[in-house]
Image (cartoon, coloured by chain):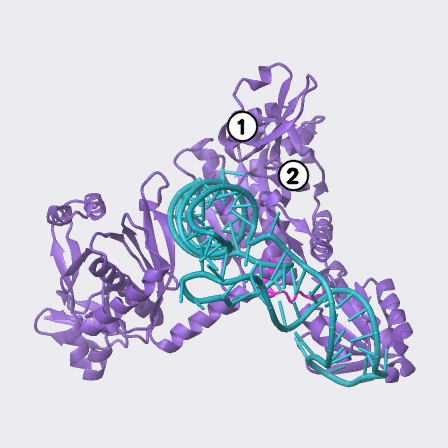
Amino acid sequence: MVAITLPDGSVRDYDNPVTGAEIAQSIGPGLAKAAMVVKVDGELWDLDRTIESDANVAIITDKQESEALDVLRHDAAHVLAMAVQELYPETQITFGPATEEGFYYDFHREEPFSTEDFEAIEKRMAEIVDRDVPIVREVWTRDDVANFFKEKGETFKAEWVMELPDGEDITMYRQGDWIDLCRGPHLPSTGRLGKSFKLMKLAGAYWRGDARNPQLQRIYGTAWRNDKELKAYLTRIEEAEKRDHRRLGKEMDLFHIQEEARGSVFWHPKGWSLYRTCEQYMRKRLDAAGYVEVKTPQLVDRKLWEESGHWEKFREHMFIAEVDESGGEASESAGSADASDDAAADGGIRHLALKPMNCPCHVQIFRQGIKSYRDLPLRMAEFGSCHRYEPSGALHGLMRVRAFTQDDAHIFCTEDQIESETEIFIALLASIYRDFGFEEFAVKFSDRPDVRAGSDETWDKAETALKDAAIKAGADLIMNPGEGAFYGPKLEFVLRDAIGRDWQCGTLQVDFVLPERLDAEYVGEDGGKHRPVMLHRAILGSFERFIGILIENFAGRLPMWLSPVQVVVAPITNELDGYAEEVVATLAKAGVRAEADLRNEKINYKIREHSHAKVPAILVVGGREAEARQVAIRRLGGKDQEIVALEEAVDRLSREALGPLGGQRF
RNA sequence: GCCGGCGUAGCUCAACUGGUAGAGCAACCGCCUUGUAAGCGGUAGGUUGCGGGUUCAAGUCCUGCCGCCGGCACCA
């Protein structure tokens, strides 16, 4: 007797062990047909797998979107691999999972694939779907699997299976004469995959994610339950491309990057206006939150980086300038250059590094004069310009650059203050994110790695402090076990933009090591010397990345307080130029970034153009408005206009233009 | 850094298998004095990323480099 409990709580008894397919059949033929896999005590199983004992069972159909898509996409990966091996038999298979939006499969093959091969592969995949061959789960021993793949020349698979624990059952999935090592589960047959899939892109990927290993060829695809969903997905991708900050940055004339300064931003007047608004806002918030602002050098002698440990651990990411103090020429190179370790001793050559972070410099300020426990917590902020030699393939618009400015700060405090400082910090961060239009954010918590500095007791204390503070602040923590820095645990604050992409911006990292290395100390209540703890923290992360996210999140339609041009005044005929200029002057006096458009163009044309430029408000002035000293306010994206008296318009728009910069809330 | 793709006017793109590099928008100059998302006409704009090679002839084919795009690795 097997008792099967269904999701509605009803219990069905079966005389013998039973499969998911049989349960579905016993409930109804419609369900049996729709069934994809079955969930047994929370675990997804194949429909043909026998359930031996009592269990909670749910039949999964394509109504259960996330499970259905996972299984479907995993199947798509298998069908892809089968198609590729039928077409290109010299190809080795490796590994191919479902992803958030589709699937991929990594292949090994001497000859590179090309996107031109996609058509043929897709066609073959469709054929395999048409064949509708059963997908069968088989249990093998590890050695059998290894021998099987070895004989076939599938060296990657053979290697992989030997890493699985011995003695456990290993499952192979067979579809027709093609077979793959796989945990499953899968659909009952290839026909169930349907044809709502599409191969998307080709990429290199390292075997087992390690750059020292051979590189494989990864084929990415997407798969959905039906063509409508597939089409919706493709449309969504297109829409996302339209709000790419690199594209909008060009269209809106905000910034550019050129090859003479790879990874560094040329901010144009409008982009710089946005940047400055963010900076002014942050300065105001930090002032109000009890931070002191400092500014530290860009170029710092190698000696300090040796003391801080960066020279050893971070040098390949540092720009190093070499100056010949005997009177020669200066040169500059990336860290991997041949700067030999004893170069400091080399005649008049001195090595200076462009700072990749601000912390060592802040410790230098901390060390000036004697600090008392009464000075703690000391919150030292800097809009710190940093340079890092990022790998060329990592550069990405504003999101990943080589020269950037952090809204950085270091909080020097005692161990006992970590928790309260963390709480205060999270509250500040949440409030700032809200002002920028981000209501929700994720918090990741990374605890002790295997290799670390500091005692377990200290780690216990710091981890508990961070976690408790974050939970008190109402955050749902995503755990990243073992991912902390060697010098302390950390919190990462991740923003999700409107397209659903995640970006790490804020961070808070506890550091027990740097104060020690750079000999920071304070005099405690007991009159003795103590080490402070440092909290490295940033809210926006870098202005560059954050602005990139802002642009994408708002699709360029920035809220008025952030807009470079907040209001355009457009007269209908040149006769009204005088009044338009008066309106602009009045707005400017009230602190609004306003411009007049006095070109000899029709009002239609002007509205179209400034709407494309994403100006949040256009004030149309014609003879009627001028006479009554009014303006017609036309909002970006709106169809209607609102006619109001000039003073009222100025009052309302200036309030809006200041946004959170004008509030009394801090 | 690695794999693949791409590089034509300021922008978006065209130029069949090698045969004189073209359009729209933007810009500039005129005309039009305009009422809520493109008025009309004209002018100018290029060493086809850079360098080699094949050819009677190269944007197109081969090759080296640079950059960009996608992904991987990296993101202390």
Give me the residue at 19% from left, 43% from top. A162
Left or right position of A596 against A142: right
Based on the picture, tell me whether residue A553 belongs to the magenta stretch. Answer: yes
Give me the residue at 19% from left, 48% from top. A154
User: Which secondary structure, mark 1?
Assistant: helix
- Residue A573 falls in image quadrant: bottom right
Q: Nearer the viewer, residue A661 or A228?
A: A228
Question: Residue A196: x percent and y percent?
Answer: 33, 73
Q: Which circle, 1 or 2, is nearer the viewer?
A: 1
Pointer 1 indicates a residue of which chain?
A
Please give the residue where the numbered disc 1 appears in the rendered image. Answer: A311
Q: Magenta stretch?
A: A549-560
Q: Is residue A430 above or below residue B74?
A: below
Q: Nearer the viewer, residue B45 or A120?
A: B45
**Which of the labelled discs sits on residue A377, or is there none?**
2
Question: Residue A5: x percent and y percent?
Answer: 22, 72
Q: Nearer the viewer, residue A114 or A449?
A: A114
- Residue A207 falls in image quadrant: top left
Q: Is residue A90 above or below residue A571?
A: above
Q: Pointer 1 and pointer 2: residues touching (CB < 8 Å)?
A: no
Q: CA distance from mark 1 to mark 2?
A: 29 Å
In the image, the chain rendered in cyan is B
- Answer few, some or many: residues within 10 Å of disc 1's Cα (few below 14, many 20 plus, some between 14 and 19): some
- Residue B12 falls in image quadrant: bottom right
Task: Give the residue type that dot 1 points to.
Answer: Trp
Question: Residue A430: x percent and y percent?
Answer: 60, 56
